[in-house]
Image (cartoon, grey):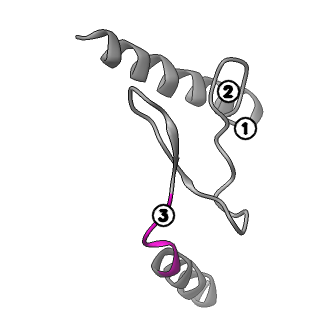
Amino acid sequence: MTDDDRRIAELASGYWINFVKTGDPNGAGLPVWRGYREPDASLLAIDSNPRPQEDEDRARHEFLASFMRSRA
């Protein structure tokens, strides 16, 4: 494992632990992970340089979600 691998594992673990404890993945020392349902939200690339990333398939994801809601 490299230092980058360890950092990525720490980030992912931190988000999961916060989400399990509070329902919100964000917490101290972690880059902010914005909610996907926010109108201008982006994805969070969790790698050695975590950063927001545009969801190029957002329209498709929203269509599929609305389709599934209509079938419930």
Q: Is residue 66 positioned above or below 11 on the image?
A: below
- Asked which quadrant contains residue 57, the reply is bottom left
* Upstream in sequence: badge 1 or badge 3: 1
State the quadrant of the N terminus: top left
Callout 2 environment at 10 Å: few (<14), some (14 to 19), or many (20+)? some
Callout 3 environment at 10 Å: few (<14), some (14 to 19), or many (20+)? few
Percent coordinates x, y for residue 48 in the rendering: 39, 26
Percent coordinates x, y for residue 26 in the rendering: 70, 32
Residue in the foreground of this view, choosing between 17 and 4: 4
Confirm or deny contact between disc 2 and disc 1 (CB under 8 A). yes
Check disc 2 and report its element: helix, strand or loop.
Answer: helix
Residue sitting at x 57%, y 30% = 16
Residue in the foreground of this view, choosing between 25 and 57: 57
Q: Which residue is mark 2?
A: 18
Q: Amino acid at mark 3?
A: Asp
* Upstream in sequence: badge 2 or badge 1: 2
Q: Which residue is mark 3?
A: 55
Residue sitting at x 73%, y 63% = 38
Question: Which segment did they paint magenta?
Answer: 54-59
Q: Which residue is mark 1?
A: 24
Classify residue 19 as left or right of residue 44: right
* Upstream in sequence: badge 3 or badge 2: 2
Residue sitting at x 56%, y 78% = 62
Percent coordinates x, y for residue 53 in the rendering: 49, 52
State the quadrant of the C terminus: bottom right
Q: Amino acid at mark 1?
A: Asp
Percent coordinates x, y for residue 67 in the rendering: 54, 87
Spatial separation of the CA atoms under disc 1 and disc 3:
20 Å
Q: Is residue 71 positioned above or below 59 on the image?
A: below
